[in-house]
Image (cartoon, rainbow, N blue to C red):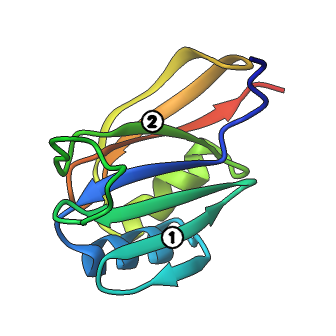
């Protein structure tokens, strides 16, 4: 089997409304679907999906829990601009900036929590 790419990531949360406001307002992600049990955003070529921890899909993890995810997004803006942007929204940087190794080489990253305490790494690759 040859894997080509990631299509989507699903994260479990308690509060879809708070999650929607955070990702749509702070990260300016376009909303694709939003109802009482599912929230979908476009994130580059992929989808970022949020489900409530009480979602009834048969193919969910056995014990879904909110706040147990960590993922990394590649930023188009500089980390200094992003740091200012996050401060305007009252989003605390919990770590960084620091150099780390990413899928495509060395990058600088900062880390924040979403309202459910999932960790979001925001990176900037060196040119």
Q: Position of residue 122 (x, y in %)?
A: 52, 41
Residue at 66% across, 35% down:
124
Q: Quadrant of residue 120?
A: top left
The C terminus: image quadrant: top right
Instruction: Tell me, yes or no, whether the two marked residues, 1 and 2, touch with CB atoms within 8 Å.
Output: no
Residue 110 occupies quadrant: top left
Image location (x, y in percent) of residue 13: 23, 60
Distance of mark 1 from mark 2, alpha carbons? 24 Å
Q: Which residue is mark 1?
A: 40
Is 36 placed above or below 94 here? below
Q: Quadrant of residue 39?
A: bottom left
Secondary element type, mark 1: strand
At a point 75% along the width and 54% down the height, the residue shown is 45
Q: Nearer the viewer, mark 1 or mark 2?
A: 1
What is the x, y in percent for residue 95? Answer: 32, 31
Asked whether 102 or 81 is in front, the reply is: 102
Q: What numbered label is drawn on residue 110? A: 2
Badge 1 density bin: few <14, some 14–19, many ≥20, Cα 10 Å: many
5 sits to left or right of 84: right
Q: Is residue 126 left or right of residue 97?
A: right
Q: Which mark is residue 108?
A: none
Quarter placement of the N terminus: top right
In the displayed structure, 96 sits above or below 85; it is: above
Q: Nearer the viewer, residue 2 or 74?
A: 2
Q: Provide the secondary structure element on which disc 2 rests.
A: strand
Q: Residue furthest front?
A: 58
Q: Position of residue 2 (x, y in %)?
A: 78, 19
């Amino acid at each position: 089997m040859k894997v080509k790419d990631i299509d989507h990531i699903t994260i479990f949360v308690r509060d879809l409304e708070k999650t929607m406001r955070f990702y749509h307002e702070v990260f300016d992600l376009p909303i694709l679907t939003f109802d009482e049990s599912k929230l979908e955003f476009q994130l580059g070529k992929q989808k970022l999906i949020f489900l409530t921890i009480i979602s009834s899909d048969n193919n969910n993890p056995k014990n879904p829990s909110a706040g147990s995810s960590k993922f990394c997004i590649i930023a188009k803006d500089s980390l200094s601009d992003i740091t200012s942007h996050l401060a305007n929204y009252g989003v605390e940087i919990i770590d960084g900036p620091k150099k780390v190794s990413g899928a495509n080489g060395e990058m600088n990253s900062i880390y924040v929590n979403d309202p459910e305490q999932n960790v979001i790494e925001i990176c900037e690759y060196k040119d």
